[in-house]
Amino acid sequence: MTATSGSFHIGDKSIDLPVKHGTVGPDVVDIGKLFAQTGMFTYDPGFTSTASCESKITYIDGDAGVLLYRGYPIEQLAEHGDFLETCYLLLYGELPTAVQKADFDYRITRHTMVHEQMARFFQGFRRDAHPMAVMVASVGALSAFYHDSTNISDPKQRMIASTRMIAKIPTLAAMAYKYSIGQPFVFPKNDLDYTSNFLRMCFAVPCEDYKVNPVLSRALDRIFILHADHEQNASTSTVRLAGSSGANPFACVAAGIASLWGPAHGGANEAVLKMLAEIGTPERIPRYIAKAKDKNDPFRLMGFGHRIYKNYDPRAKIMQRTTREVLNELGATDDLLDVAIELERIALHDDYFIEKKLYPNIDFYSGITLKAIGLPIEMFTALFAVARTGADSALHRDCDSADR
């Protein structure tokens, strides 16, 4: 990142502040010394015009509908790669060679088991506890079991912690699901890929064999890739803020998961399905479209439009196709799915939605897909936490570096 300077006038004062130029995206004004020179702060509570760090991880152009991980378009990564390859990219900055990919996959796979005492840890929760409550507690508890990777001043320990979290958080998420439905935990298998392993841990039972459907596995893997990072969002900012205090990696990611839990962030796809349930049947859609257009009506169509994207969310295009693949594979018939498909059709052809660029976003399609796969609504945000672990591990690992 190169820098120049610019003159800024505030009242009768003229001050010089550095202007930094990134490799891509808008220039930024370094206001680190603004208070010292003027006695004034800036006010930007939504981080709409503020960058809090230098980063090379993710770039978004909301107007153009562009999302890049380390310079690679999300469309290419989702179409031609897998989730662990994306994790490697986020952690190391470049896509792996075949040898590096095989080594990384091996290391992640051999860390998927959790300490056996974690099973007893789960027994302290009520069966009806929300999986995200269990995730916050169990991920934070990893620091009590893996003392050899909590020192963030040691680069080797930071990388070990990153590997462990990418590997173990899917296991903890599957355990949270199994515990909530009263079924025994299923151990991971080293001969399965990352996402197939997760599906098996969620849906297998000891009394019969479970065969992973490759279409469903590929769909969930894409969901993980599409949710892996999204620049300066709430959960990522939370991890970075916690990491700046020197807290251990497991505690920082647990804090990020807590932030992710909110309905305005990771819980958006839950809100979509609840909205579809409220609508009920396709015949009732026109009534709710009218409610959405009424400024005096508190009803809002969930899963349409995006705070950042003023064009079609590039992730939604991929997710739309993936949703079709899953529904075709399963021959799924579901009232909520019927409502979703008809609602999408109407919204994409309605002048009101077109004019306001209220396109279906990724949350609209991912909720439908996860429901079709068989995962309950309560698990949706836990899956988001699994997906976000790779980027948050990279962010925490380099929280004192400009090479993020």
Image: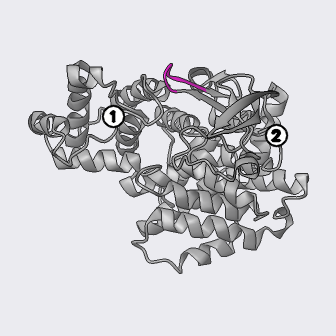
Which residue does the image show at 51% across and 46% down from the upper left? 46
Can you say which quadrant of the picture contains the N terminus? top right
Residue 211 in the image, given as x and y percentages of width and height? 50, 43
Assign the magenta stretch its main secondary structure. loop
For residue 191, what is the image quadrant? Answer: top right
Query: Which residue position holds label 2?
Result: 402
Colouring: one colour
Residue 255 in the image, given as x and y percentages of width and height? 61, 62
Query: Which residue position holds label 1?
Result: 304
Circles 2 and 1 in contact, beta carbons < 8 Å: no
Q: Amino acid at mark 2?
A: Ala
Confirm whether residue 85 shows in the render: no
* Location of residue 355 with respect to 387 vertically, above or below: above
Residue closer to the observer: 389 or 347? 347
Tell me the tag on residue 392: none
Query: Which of the two discs, 2 and 1, sits closer to the camera?
Result: 2
Q: Residues within 10 Å of mark 2 (few under 14, many from 20)?
A: few
Write down the region rendered in magenta. Answer: 62-67
Q: Secondary structure at mark 2?
A: loop
Q: CA distance from mark 2 to mark 1?
A: 35 Å
* Location of residue 155 with respect to 48 vertically, above or below: below
| Magenta run includes residue 346 | no
